[in-house]
Image (spheres, rainbow, N blue to C red):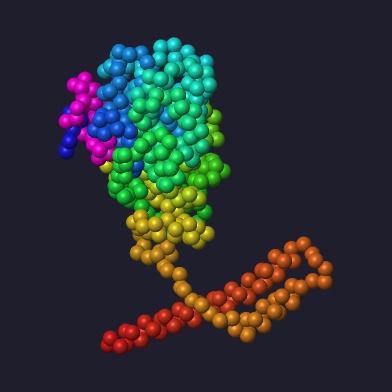
Amino acid sequence: MASFASYALSKELTHALEKLGYTNPSPVQSRVIPKVLSGSSLVCQSETGSGKTHSYLIPILEKIDFNLPRLQALVLCPSRELARQVYEFAFAFTRFFPKLKVRLFTSESERSQNAEGLLLPPQIAIATPGRAKDLFVEQGLLDLHGLRFLVLDEADMLMELGYFEDIDGIYALCPENIQTLVFSATLNQGLKSALEHYVDSRFLYEGEDNKTASSVLHHFVDVKHIGKFEALRRFLDIRHPYLALVFASKKEDVMGTYKDLREQGYEAIVFTGDLQVRERKQALRKIKSNQYPIIVCSDLLSRGIDLEGVSDVISLDLPSDLSYYYHRAGRTGRFGQKGDSWVFYNADELNRAKKLFDQGTPFDFFVLKGESLVQSDSSALKRKKIEFKHEISDEQKRDISIAKAKTSVDKVKPGYKAKRKKAIDKVEGKYRRKAIKQKVREQQNAAYAKKAKKK
């Protein structure tokens, strides 16, 4: 296995990496670092937890001039939390390079505080796009003409949140020969097209085909008729996770789940975009200090944030955009550690769960029965729909006519169309069930006949 010492890095940087606990590069770092050192702009797609941040921080630290008090690298992140995390990674190197100045620019601080920090320009700035545009473009508080590196971190999320217009304004002030580094967990055609404005993607690292790390195990849990709150409590009592992230798609479900757990005596904390900036900052600090074993959260926490020791990810529902499931699952199993992702579903959520199952990620199946979590070899998600066509019989036509007659009115009244449709649907459902039963019988008879022939 290659080590950081095998790259063309200075002894000082290699020593700093070793002291910070970084000795062997991850696969994505092995591919990306040499390309950045060679001066290439690039687009990098890799699974979450693969070490993308240090893929760009390490070569940037190698190539910038610590003796030059001028902005040389700008990292744009889609959220305050991710920006602060990148800042903390970069700031750790100031212990070994006293002349290195790193600054964070987000809405966590007042605009005046951000401006004061620019009296002595940093070599590396980490910022959210909106604040960077405000300070660097609209107010002109920092000269970007000496910029050597522009990093777009979590580019898919930058695009989803509509930040590319702000990035356009920033990019217009950058020098023509700037080295642009784009990192993203997903890379669809729309994003590829948008990135053509910023980077000649001569190097495109696709990573592995896995949507999450191979060390993550995926499980479906049929909670049947049990309510989600009660199902979660039973699951937690059975599983006893070391550190669990509990995801819900709707903010009211996030807060409802959190309040229920707290009322029942569980040690839990909540993290959602509805929290005030100070509350979010305090919550993230408590989360990272491992004060709570259960974190109830929205999909805001599914992207980019590194949390150590997440043993279990629990999805109380599935997001409307199923790609977010993989972001959720990617919060565990990071950097080679093992993890489990659990998806709760019931009959009402069968269709969306089946869509996820059909995407090819290997799942196993459990059923929540009483106070036990029982593994099952079969699941409704694995059953194929019975394909059948049946002729509408005269009897069915007659019953539909009767239903229409019974719901007809002399004068139009509110809701009469809904009543008529309900009556017709009832008739059609009756004959549909009869057709399905007939089809099942035919298939069973065919199977019995096939067995009989073999005998």
Q: Residue at image x 53%, y 21%?
A: 138
The magenta stretch spans residue 379: no
Image quarter in which the C terminus is found:
bottom left
Q: Residue at image x 60%, y 84%?
A: 393
Q: Is residue 109 visible to us here?
A: no
Residue 114: give x, y in percent of width and height. Answer: 48, 18
Q: Which of these two is toward me, 296 or 263?
A: 296
Drawn side of residue 117 relative to residue 53, left or right: right
Q: Quadrant of residue 81?
A: top left
Residue 142: give x, y in percent of width and height. Answer: 45, 17
Residue 40: give x, y in percent of width and height. Answer: 30, 32
Q: Is residue 141 visible to us here?
A: yes
The magenta stretch spans residue 8: yes
Image quarter in which the N terminus is found:
top left
Specify the farthest residue to the right: 411
Specify the farthest residue to the front: 176
Q: Which of these two is toward me, 263 or 200?
A: 200
Drawn side of residue 404 relative to residue 358, left or right: right
Q: Residue at image x 67%, y 69%?
A: 421
Q: Is residue 81 above or below residue 322?
A: above
Which region is colored magenta?
Answer: 6-32
Q: Residue at image x 35%, y 48%?
A: 211
Residue 22: give x, y in percent of width and height. Answer: 24, 30
